[in-house]
Image: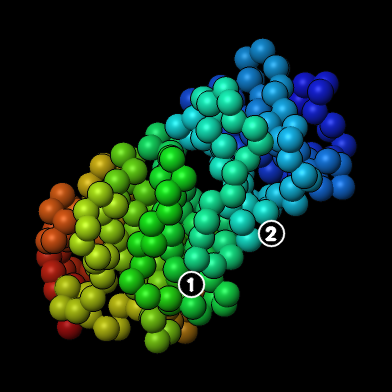
Amino acid sequence: LEFPLQVPLEGVIETLAVSAGGDHALVATKASHGGDLWWIELATDVATLLTAGDAPHAVDPVSLRIGAGRAWFVAAGVVHRRDLHDPAADGFSPVPLPAPAEGEVALAPFEGRLAVVVGETATARNLVVIDAEGTPLTVTQAPAAVDLPGYDHPLGPFVAFSPDGTIIAWRTVEAGSAELFVRHLDDPDPSLHLTKEPAFPAYIDNVGILGFTLDRVLQFVTGDQTLGGTQGLDLVSAGEVFAADLSDPEQPVFSNVSQTGGVYEPPFTAVA
């Protein structure tokens, strides 16, 4: 990607965000080179400075996101948002959150919702979803070891939005066991714990590779954290792929997609 001449190439951070339509990019410069955010129209190479009235931002390189006409980034534990359709907007606005935000975030690009993990320690985090207008909603019921999205992890991602942005799924570690939760964001009911007994026996203690195939169908991989001396990425081949149809917010319907373990309907107990 060649940047327009207005953008100081030497100071650009190593990552950028591209819109879902592929027509725009959000680029940031290092704090030592102005700490600015640039909105680039890729077809014409026209660059617009979005932070002319801001002090320099120390942008977290993994936090840049654009979607539904909004631009987002995290700097020093603070989430910043700008409405790109508002001609009166002057720079970015901070979003009020209950605790400092981690840099890696997840975006529902067509709905404009942003998911961010907040907390003072890795074992006492909450997951917060910020809507397109900048209003935050804490979706977890209590602080816990909520995972970051984990896009660079072999078993990631650990946070996923449905395509329409109305459901979010995430992974939390409880007593050493990785567990899967979901919440319907437009429903007042609390989160649902998917990987619990009796459908998923206690020995199934690992989950990852979260992704929605349809608006209400979540697919994920589960298995044991240690199996026959095997750990980590090698466990992917030993895991099973499941689907949860979340059309009914109160009653998910599970199915075994990979059908490698011999049990196709819950409870998914091991075959003797």
Amino acid beneath label 2:
Ala
What residue appears at the point 57 percent right and 22 percent down from the top-left corner? 87
- Looking at the figure, which quarter contains the N terminus? top right
Is 61 displayed left or right of 105 in the figure? Answer: right
Q: Say if mark 2 contacts mark 1, CB within 8 Å.
A: no
What residue appears at the point 43 percent right and 54 percent down from the top-left corner? 136
Residue 243: % across, % down: 24, 56
Amino acid beneath label 1:
Arg
Is 236 displayed left or right of 164 in the figure? Answer: right
The one of 141 and 224 positioned closer to us in this rendering? 141
Quick check: 2 above or below 80? above
Confirm whether residue 26 shows in the render. Answer: yes
Q: Secondary structure at mark 2?
A: loop
Q: Secondary structure at mark 1?
A: strand
Mark sitting on residue 76: 2
Mark sitting on residue 66: none
The one of 242 and 97 positioned closer to us in this rendering? 97
Quick check: 45 above or below 257? above
Residue 211: % across, % down: 36, 51
The one of 61 and 259 positioned closer to us in this rendering? 61
Q: Residue furthest top?
A: 44
What residue appears at the point 84 percent right and 31 percent down from the top-left corner? 8
Q: Which residue is disc 1 drawn over?
A: 125
Q: Residue furthest front?
A: 88
Q: To which quarter of the image does residue 259 belong?
A: bottom left
Distance from disc 2 to disc 1, alpha carbons, whole Å, reads 17 Å
- Looking at the figure, which quarter contains the C terminus? bottom left
Q: To which quarter of the image does residue 204 belong?
A: bottom left
Total of numbered circles in the picture? 2
